[in-house]
Amino acid sequence: MRINYSMIVLIVTFLCGCIGCSQAANGNYITQPDFNGLQKADTNIPLLWGIWDVSISPEGAIEVAPPHTAAFALNVNGLLGPFVPDIDFHLVQISHPSGFTDVMVDVGITNPQSSGGIYTGFDVCGIVMGTGGAVHPYDPTLTYGGQFMLQLLNADGYTRWMNSPEFSDTDPAWLGYTPGPQGSPGFIPAVTLNPYKYYCDGLGSEENAYDYLAVNSSSRGIFTEGATNWRRYILRFPDATGIQFQYAILACYAFNINHPNPPVNIPDDFPPNANAKEAVAIDVINDTSDMWNDGSSNGGNFSADVSVLNWNAKPGAGDVMSEYVIYIYSNAWVGGVTPDMTVISQGDNHCTYNVNIPATPAAAGALDVWITVAHPGATYANPFGVATGADDKTLAAHFKYTANVSNQHPSGEFWQPPVGHAPRFLFIHHSTGEGFLFDGGMWDMLENAGFEVHDITYGDGWIGDNTDPEHFPITFTEYYDEMIHFELPAGQFYDIVAFKSCFPASNIYDDQMLNDYYGYYATVKSVTKKHPETLFIPFSTPPLVPADTEPANAARARIFANWLKGTYDDGEFNMRSYDVFNVLAGNNPASGDFNMLRYDYQGDPYDSHPNHTANTTVAADFTAWLSDLVW
């Protein structure tokens, strides 16, 4: 197939004279010249710096034509004058894997100004704009170049700014996307989420942006006047479309404290809002994920530490970040999962969070994991009221991480009962569990079925006194050894550990609390998978009587119970969930006990402890369930 190498259009948006600064909620990947009285000191707006025609021949020769006049509603070309950036391309390699053409090219940009540092740029991003229709796993308005489309294989991140579908046809034109008049005929980049490479002084062409910025945070990612910075792009083009894309460079800027005079100290004379509001880089470290799909079943967890670099965000009380919210998406789980926003480590401008997400991957191999850092309350709207398709969208930075899904189960088989002794069974519980064990007879039933039974409850130290969902991550990390050996002779451990919260935990009063529960149990699973010698059994939370909860809260309790039995109980070789909620809760939507303790299981309408009938029902059901599971 013949590849069309004839035209690659580059649109470069960068800094120019008399640029505004921004304190607006929409960030400041935007610059504006001072003309016609429109300058606002707290506003940045995009400005086209020039348009280039770039040709790459099949032999690898690169030709770059001079910039063309922009066809804008406002004639900014006269304002630019000699302020034309130098842009250069060094082709490194062209290869042809099956169905694709891979172009490895170093792109160098020079800030040609010489105004004593007035036009120092911040957080410069070279954005590749292409076509393709891969859809973000959560937001259908976010499309990007997928497997058989244009891809930047080594992207530093993805941005929504200035994409063609949402930012076209603005009036004036420099507030939005404008295609190059010399571009490939009819080619308009069609995706809304475009990859970029990050540029700043000192950052090498192949260096990891996060690694550099985390160590050199005092430089604030500046691009100084007269500087030339290079970044390497590894671009993959599908043979079906040929080499076509557009390229934009966006930068952040604000007046320095001596404006209109030059700064004395760079970057310190520039205010904090000279940097981007959104995160500019992330790092995924300590990836201990054990996701798998063996062709017949799947499971595991996406487990890692995620570090976010954001210039102007610091954690508040309790080391909890509130400036932004992290959402993690993948086709291996449902919806966006928000990790615990408690910072586990931090530097001057970066914070690290622990992530543990139960997964059910559809196939083995590479898995795209999208990490979105969103800024609630901030949008892409511009302060001039010029409408775009992204005006009401939450400002966010997007990053794509490639995780691995094994084609084999981590253990190869389900947990096996011990040989030579009765399985040692430990039950961690409070009063409802006591009802199951003694009033319902579960202790005796389990012993008669061949188990050695022990329990931990009130008065048995930290573990027994703390059984709410938020306590289990502590139990399974800080108190694991104490738990697994409780009351046993030296050298022995429990073969089976069941653990449950009591009924107050079913009063899940909002979606954030529900998401917190998911995170707590994910942390537990990150520990249990390291101990294949023990079978772990989380109980869902027992339901409440109607007098002690609200319908919406009770509905969330059922959602949690279903998640625990479904998504969470995903075939993990030493983890099975017991759904006591659905044994005890009413399931008729027309009844007043729907999602609450069934009327016939109540002893008192104001007491959520199950009655004798309920206790014996659970005791018999659990004993039969566990016996079938083990033997």
Image: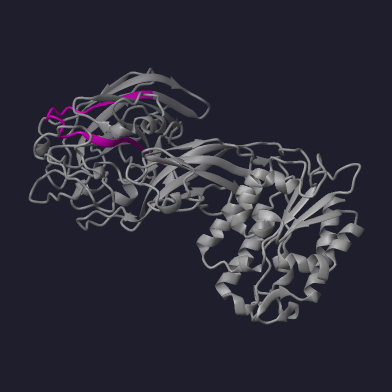
Looking at the image, residue 429 sits to the left or right of residue 113; the answer is: right
Looking at the image, residue 63 sits to the left or right of residue 304; the answer is: left
Q: Is residue 145 above or below residue 568?
A: above
In magenta stretch: residue 92: no
Viewer-nearest residue: 7 or 332: 332
Q: Is residue 383 above or below residue 542?
A: above
Q: Is residue 424 above or below residue 539?
A: above
Q: Is residue 513 above or below residue 342?
A: below
Q: Residue at x 86, y 56 (%)?
A: 627
Residue 582: x %, y % from top left: 71, 67
Q: Residue at x 69, y 40 (%)?
A: 530
The magenta region covers 105-131
Looking at the image, residue 116 sits to the left or right of residue 176; the answer is: left
Residue 354: x %, y % from top left: 53, 44
Q: Residue at x 32, y 51 (%)?
A: 166
Residue 599 occupies quadrant: bottom right
Residue 298 seen in render: no
Viewer-nearest residue: 238 or 249: 249
Viewer-nearest residue: 226 or 466: 466
